[in-house]
Image (cartoon, helix red, strand yellow):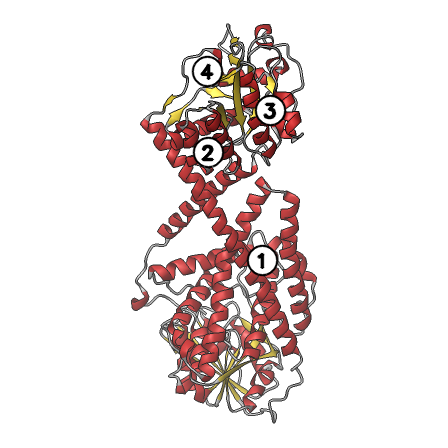
């Protein structure tokens, strides 16, 4: 039942700003994850020499193929230059590395040798201090792309991105800019292919000189120190650009080989120089502009933030996984223990008559089916329909039925809690059942519902609400949620003696208990949860009777479902805050606080808030990780839910057929539910008030229980 807004609930705060903020946060998070995925999972992990160029070389100019290793691919007049005789340009690729680069720098300093380091942008961002040390100690620096990408096979947009980002990162880390480029997986000039030349020409248009090599130490193979030295010895007296590595794995052999190679070559009359000095070029490395440095620092900061965001999300994912598994284990164990108590007897059968209160506001679609199912009860009852200012003739429909024992009370619209209090004052009996105007009972429902009142400590009883209109996909999804989520949870709450909610669709109450707490309150939107918590805090036991079955009409559209669940969730948060004092109380109130409220906070607030992390990581994994592993993890989560579903459906005596829609539920329904929680939490934190929202009725439960067409 719903109500029109009244004056003291009229304060409204627009919620569009909340969604704008959430959207901005989502865009920022997506951008950070894309950046993290690109920098860490698009990295070319193969060693330079392990990838050999293949293909035609028809477009490579002869002068380049037979020329020197430093290439200036000027359009129409490309040229190259070779090192001077007896000059060795040591070049190190793939760094900086926090372990091996310092060792190599120490060795070069000891030998008073200057070298050229072709650095990878992501490694520079990770180790800017080490990159600054390279420059400070007089070594030359060049770029080796941003993620060690193969420029010969990369798309044009990626080639441009790789060079631009590596240059920015270098500027941010060192304040320097360099035109020297060594393409990953390149080797000597005579090995160039058409694809390689296309990439070199594109780099030249961006202002880069390409530095190839004339000799490969093949240290990436880790062939042993002796072999590396042999591979590095120059051919005759010609100058060489020697390819080595200061990163990419264990470089113990490289360091050991250098310690012997440099003194040996010096003894043979060779000198060591940077690439530009070796070929006689003016110093190409220059200071970056202030703007470039600022943009570079921002890029480094963005990479670090993305790394931090991923680390945080990883912990959130672990938390979500742990909570999901914990909830599954807890509820299944509790449900199993609860099922063993089915033969439990509350005492002598309860046969005293019951007052059934039906609050109704514009319930013309289903009120007749509700009333007829109630009067078909096999337990003595009176029915009090409280019409809360309906405008669709709800009261007229009930009066026209002219059924003995059914009374209609009309009142101006004041809301569901007020209507229930009106019905409570008009009730003749001590036991009271409250039922929504869209709900249908079975003949034995009321009799089953009141049996726990044989125990004088029981103040309220929750019945077993089931979805009646479950034929469509949305109805099946809600049916699954009712069985797995709501009813499985109620078994746990019953066992732990901390029932937080007796649903408005079906609830039994001891009238004296209601009067002792002052009746129903309208300070929250979830009056049923507020009422149940108040009874627990007053010392009453609230139990669950699974045999008392009620069929309720669920929303038939996503919009209606959103409005209903938004009201439920926001109202539950209000009730939790109102009754937070139960956390420090003793007795029945303490059980509600430390067990019930804790459970609600962990599994109905925190877990849904963490649920988006699972979806975000799934997309991240599909883009950047192994899709097979991601699929297996997702199937693991699905299997966990499916197992819970099978068990819950068996306990509830339901056919397992609707569970085939469970995989589809993960792509629409689950997202809707956690967005509801997010919206509710944001609304609560912002201090906004949510108005009462009318539930759209369809009149789908028109058949009598047990007749054809009824679930």
Give the residue number, with chain letter if any, for mark 2. 124
Does dot 3 land on a helix, a strand or a loop?
loop
Residue 134's label in the rendered image is none
The residue lying furthest to the front in this view is: 267
Q: Which circle's residue, 3 or 2, is located before the other in the chain?
A: 2
Q: Which circle's residue, 3 or 4, is located before the other in the chain?
A: 3
Separation of residues labelled 1 and 3 (CA atoms): 54 Å
Q: Is residue 468 visible?
A: no
| Residue 339: percent from left, percent from top | 65, 78
| Residue 568: percent from left, percent from top | 46, 66
Residue closest to the eye, 174 or 539: 174
The answer to whether 11 appears left or right of 365 in the picture is left
Mark 3, Cα crowd under 10 Å, few <14 / some 14-19 / many 20+, is: many
Q: Is residue 327 visible?
A: yes
The mark closer to the camera, 1 or 3, is: 3
Q: Which circle's residue, 1 or 4, is located before the other in the chain?
A: 4
Residue 474's label in the rendered image is 1
Mark 1, Cα crowd under 10 Å, few <14 / some 14-19 / many 20+, is: many
Residue closest to the eye, 121 or 364: 121
Give the residue number, with chain letter if any, for mark 3. 185
Does dot 4 land on a helix, a strand or a loop?
helix
Mark 4, Cα crowd under 10 Å, few <14 / some 14-19 / many 20+, is: some
Separation of residues labelled 3 and 4 (CA atoms): 21 Å
Q: Which circle's residue, 1 or 3, is located before the other in the chain?
A: 3
Residue closest to the eye, 436 or 119: 119
**Residue in the picture at 36% in, 60% down:** 685
The mark closer to the camera, 1 or 2, is: 2
Does dot 2 land on a helix, a strand or a loop?
helix
**Residue in the picture at 54% in, 88% down:** 453
User: Mark 1 touching mark 4, by CB under 8 A?
Assistant: no
Q: Which circle's residue, 2 or 4, is located before the other in the chain?
A: 2
């Amino acid at each position: 039942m719903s109500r029109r807004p009244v004056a003291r609930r009229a304060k409204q705060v627009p919620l569009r700003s909340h969604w704008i903020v959430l959207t901005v946060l989502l865009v920022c998070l997506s951008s950070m994850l894309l950046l993290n995925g690109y920098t860490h999972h698009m990295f070319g992990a193969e060693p330079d020499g392990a990838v050999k160029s293949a293909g035609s070389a028809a477009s490579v100019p002869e002068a380049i193929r037979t020329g020197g290793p430093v290439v200036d691919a000027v359009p129409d007049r490309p040229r190259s230059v070779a090192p001077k005789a007896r000059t060795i340009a040591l070049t190190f690729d793939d760094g900086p590395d926090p372990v091996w680069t310092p060792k190599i720098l120490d060795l070069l300093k000891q030998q008073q040798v200057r070298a050229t380091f072709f650095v990878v942008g992501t490694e520079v961002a990770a180790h800017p201090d080490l990159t600054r040390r390279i420059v400070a100690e007089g070594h030359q620096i060049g770029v080796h792309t941003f993620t060690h990408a193969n420029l010969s096979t990369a798309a044009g947009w990626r080639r441009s991105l790789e060079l631009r980002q590596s240059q920015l990162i270098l500027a941010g880390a060192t304040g320097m800019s360099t035109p020297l480029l060594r393409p990953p997986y390149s080797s000597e000039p005579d090995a160039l292919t058409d694809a390689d030349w296309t990439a070199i020409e594109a780099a030249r248009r961006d202002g880069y000189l390409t530095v190839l090599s004339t000799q490969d130490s093949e240290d990436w193979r880790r062939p042993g120190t002796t072999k590396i030295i042999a591979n590095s010895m120059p051919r005759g007296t010609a100058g060489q650009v020697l390819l080595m590595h200061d990163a990419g794995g264990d470089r113990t052999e490289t360091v050991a080989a250098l310690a012997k190679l440099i003194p040996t070559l010096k003894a043979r009359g060779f000198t060591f120089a940077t690439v530009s000095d070796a070929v006689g070029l003016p110093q190409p490395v220059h200071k970056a502009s202030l703007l470039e440095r600022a943009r570079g620092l921002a890029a480094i900061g963005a990479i670090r933030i993305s790394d931090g965001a991923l680390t945080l999300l990883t912990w959130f994912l672990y938390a979500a996984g742990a909570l999901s598994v914990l909830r599954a284990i807890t509820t299944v164990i509790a449900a199993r223990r609860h099922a063993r108590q089915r033969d439990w007897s509350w005492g002598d059968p309860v046969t005293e008559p019951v007052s059934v209160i039906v609050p109704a506001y514009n319930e013309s679609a289903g009120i007749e089916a509700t009333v007829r199912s109630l009067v078909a009860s096999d337990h003595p009852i009176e029915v009090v329909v409280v019409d809360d200012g309906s405008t669709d003739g709800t009261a007229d429909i009930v009066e026209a039925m002219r059924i003995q024992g059914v009374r209609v009370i009309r009142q101006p619209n004041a809301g569901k809690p007020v209507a229930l209090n009106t019905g409570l004052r008009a009730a003749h009996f001590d036991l009271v059942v409250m039922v929504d105007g869209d709900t249908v009972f079975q003949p034995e429902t009321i009799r089953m519902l009141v049996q726990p009142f044989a125990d004088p400590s029981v103040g309220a009883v929750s019945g077993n609400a089931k979805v009646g209109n479950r034929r469509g996909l949305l109805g099946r999804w809600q049916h699954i949620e009712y069985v797995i989520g709501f009813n499985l949870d109620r078994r746990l709450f019953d066992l732990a003696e901390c029932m937080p909610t007796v649903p408005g669709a079906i609830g039994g109450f001891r009238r004296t208990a209601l009067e002792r707490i002052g009746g129903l309150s309208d300070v929250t939107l979830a009056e049923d949860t507020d009422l149940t918590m108040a009874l627990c805090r007053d010392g009453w036991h609230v139990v669950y009777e699974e045999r008392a079955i009620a069929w309720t009409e669920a929303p038939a559209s996503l919009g209606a479902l959103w409005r209903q669940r938004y009201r439920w969730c926001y109202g539950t948060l209000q009730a939790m805050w109102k009754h937070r004092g139960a956390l420090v109380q003793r007795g029945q109130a303490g059980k509600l606080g430390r067990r019930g409220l804790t459970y609600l906070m962990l599994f109905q607030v925190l877990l849904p808030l963490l649920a988006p992390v699972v979806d975000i990581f799934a997309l991240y994994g599909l883009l950047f990780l192994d899709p097979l592993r991601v699929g297996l993890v997702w199937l693991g989560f699905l299997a966990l839910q499916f197992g819970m579903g099978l068990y819950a459906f068996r306990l509830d005596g339901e056919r397992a057929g609707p569970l085939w829609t469970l995989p589809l539920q993960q792509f629409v329904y689950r997202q809707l539910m956690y967005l509801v929680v997010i919206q509710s939490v944001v609304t609560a934190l912002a201090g906004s008030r949510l108005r009462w929202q009318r539930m759209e009725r369809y009149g789908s439960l028109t058949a009598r229980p047990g007749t054809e067409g009824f679930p």
